[in-house]
Amino acid sequence: MNCERARAMMLGAEGGLRVALHLLHCPACRAEAGRIRALDSALQTLPRHAPPEALLAKVLAAADSPSVLPQTKESHMKRRVLLAAAAMVVIAALAAVVVPGRHGTRDAKTIFASVAQAMENVTSLYMGGRVSGGKELMPGLQEMWMGERAQAVRYYDKGAGKLMAAKADLDTKQWWFYDGRTKALYRADLTPVWDKAEKAVPRLLRFYRSGGLTDRFLKNWPHIKHEMAVEKRDGGDVGVLTFFFEQDLPGTPPQHVIDREVFEINLADDSLLAQRRYFKYPDGTERIIEDLSTITYNTPVPEDKELLAEAKQVPEVAATVLVDQTQNGLYLRLAVDGKPINEGSAPTTMEVPRG
């Protein structure tokens, strides 16, 4: 394949693999592909405008206007058709910015909204991978299950290498947390706060099943820098949607980092394939802090005995549920003697957003 053909195919839907092979050996075309991606990313940040209703009519009227140069009937018709086609291109560009290629009729926001809706509508969602506990990803898996009536998490503490697990279950009205460091199982009854938990927790679980995508990304879409690419994998199209944020990490002094979150999407059914997060530091180094590479839909939440396979005989500690109404919503925490357990950790804290 020559460069002219490769560059033409970059803008179309065909030849994904052939173009990719050409790019491996052609620095000039790789640079051109980078410019196309940058242009597409810039276009996606532009505001949307409704084209004037009279635009097409004005263009066609201009096509009928007398020309300084003499025209045959055939050339006049060609001019009219070309101007009409140009007008339709302008109208399409004004109406929406779209992802190029086979899925070019849908923009990145439409695809991402479909992903969030699909995740929220499943009966349960499983996400497995690793999260950072320091300079490297934690050993072992972090696993999360989000169902309609229960949520469970299982992971390993980096420092001690011990199992941590928790589950909140509306059907049994139980919320427990197992701490492998102390070999203690804390269990609380949700009945005393049932009037709040019965309404709030299902809303929280819907929020978790969608990964918070609606609240974190879709509601703030115009203000978030992002870029979209489409890759060929195993004969199918995978959308790679990347978001960029800047934030200051707590510390003395605070560290300013670029937070990059990457979502890999199966464009055949808008299911989420993987979710990864990276921090880029001022010295230019970048570290992966989250790698959720196993995501399955409608995977049942495990029974307690499956989650606590290593905890056959452990002391059980009676816990209670603290409920606080905050500006952002409802805040539930597991506590013993009025003191929160493992405060700030997701397994012992549920923050239910408003709405």
Image (cartoon, helix red, strand yellow):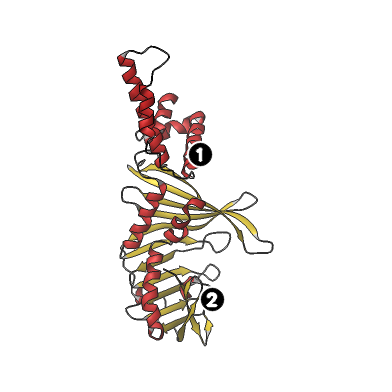
Name the residue type under label 1.
Ala
| Image coordinates for residue 129, horizontal then vertical, percent | 44, 60
**Which numbered marker is on residue 325?**
none
Q: Earlier in the sequence, mark 1 or mark 2?
A: 1
Few, some or many residues within 10 Å of mark 2 (<14, 14–19, 20+):
few
Position of 314 relative to 87 (above/below):
below
Mark 1 → mark 2, Cα distance in angstroms: 43 Å
Where 280 falls versus 325 (above or below)? above
Judge from the rendering whether residue 335 lies leftward or rightward of residue 294; answer left or right. Answer: right
Q: Which mark is residue 38?
A: 1
Residue type for callout 2: Glu
Q: Read off the residue under disc 2.
A: 343
Does the rendering let one see residue 67? yes
Which is more foreground, mark 1 or mark 2?
Answer: 1
Quarter of the image for residue 119 reads bottom left
Under circle 1, the secondary element is helix
> Depth check: 354 or 246 in front?
354
Q: Nearer the viewer, residue 188 or 92?
A: 92
